[in-house]
Image (cartoon, helix red, strand yellow):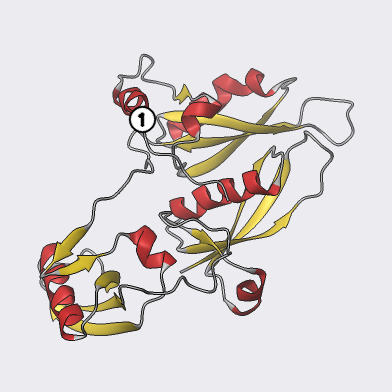
Amino acid sequence: MKRFKKSSIALALLLSLPVANIYAALPLTTEESQYLIPFKEISVTGSYLQAQNAADDISKSADEAGAKYYHITGIQQPATGTTTDRTIVYADIYKSNAPIAVSKKEVTHNGVVLYPRSKALYYLPFAVVKFKGDYNNTSEILDAASKIATEKNAYAFYVYSIMPNDVKNREQDIDVALYQKDAPVRDVIISKAIAGQDAYEITDDAFKVMQPYETIVFHGTFNNTSEISAAAQKYAIANDAHFYYVKEVSANPADTIQTVYVNLYR
């Protein structure tokens, strides 16, 4: 699977630049978009001979959806080939604060390592502990979770879920995963996966037993399965999934747009 690259100063500057036209989203090049996580896929339909002919319409639609940037991913011509009236153009759209893959420094609480999401999903915890409490903020929750980790002699911990969310001064149900220092890699993850990612592709065997919470669809033109998996990973992260599986890819002729179905898991 293609691993996300670290963000660059140039990209950070791009995201901070003012928009010249406040009524339309701006295009991103393929190189710029590869660093970013889209929050949604959109499409427009019209008389387009080429994908770029739809740029204005895509820009307006992206702006209406609250996006600052867009990247056109593919074009689907009418099956008859006799008219361009029903040509569909797809694009990924991005907010001004689109997530960028960055390296994360190790953080500790009460002497226990707080794993970032990428490590927590990659390694298998030796226990998941549930506890309740009345906490005012995340710092208080992390403090309580780290103390539980210390009691269990854990090397690291990760807070999986907090319910109910965004409600202050009410009792909350919290799940915290605990890890040994030499924790094994989760066996549901494909063997070629690289540590440090925010969503991982699962194996065929795991697909047979795991239940997805959602199946999403996106479109694009891809040269190989690695490119499809990399795109699916971005959509999984955008939808806050921990794991994903490319369930189906339309069998289209070479260099034509494909439809990809992806199962999402937590």
User: Can you tell which quarter of the image residue 95 is in?
Assistant: top left
Location of residue 23 with respect to 127 vertically, above or below = above
Q: Is residue 12 above or below residue 173?
A: above
Looking at the image, is 83 positioned above or below residue 161? Answer: above
Relative to the observer, which residue lies in front, 19 or 122?
122
Please report the residue visible at 27 percent of the width from the left and 84 percent of the height from the top. Answer: 130
Q: Is residue 57 visible?
A: yes
Residue 45 position (above or below residue 123): above
Give the residue type that dot 1 points to. Answer: Ser
Residue 137 appears in the rendering? no
Tell me where residue 33 appears, x and y as whole percent: 49, 32
Q: Estimate the x, y position of residue 11 in percent, counting from the top left.
A: 37, 27
Give the residue number, with chain letter if any, for mark 1. Answer: 8
Residue at the image point whose x is 57% and y is 76% from the top:
210
> Which residue is at the far front?
182
Q: Secondary structure at mark 1?
A: loop
Asked whether, in this view, residue 75 is left or right of residue 60, the answer is: right
Which residue in the rendered view is the most extreme toward the top? 20
- In the rendering, at what x and y percent does residue 97 appear? 32, 37
As drawn, is 115 to the left or to the right of 94? left
Figure disc tally: 1
Q: Which residue appears at 32% of the width and 27% of the height? A: 9
The residue at 45%/53% (across/down) is 237
Dot 1 crowding, Cα within 10 Å, few <14, some 14–19, many 20+ = some
Residue 212 position, x and y percent, is 56, 70
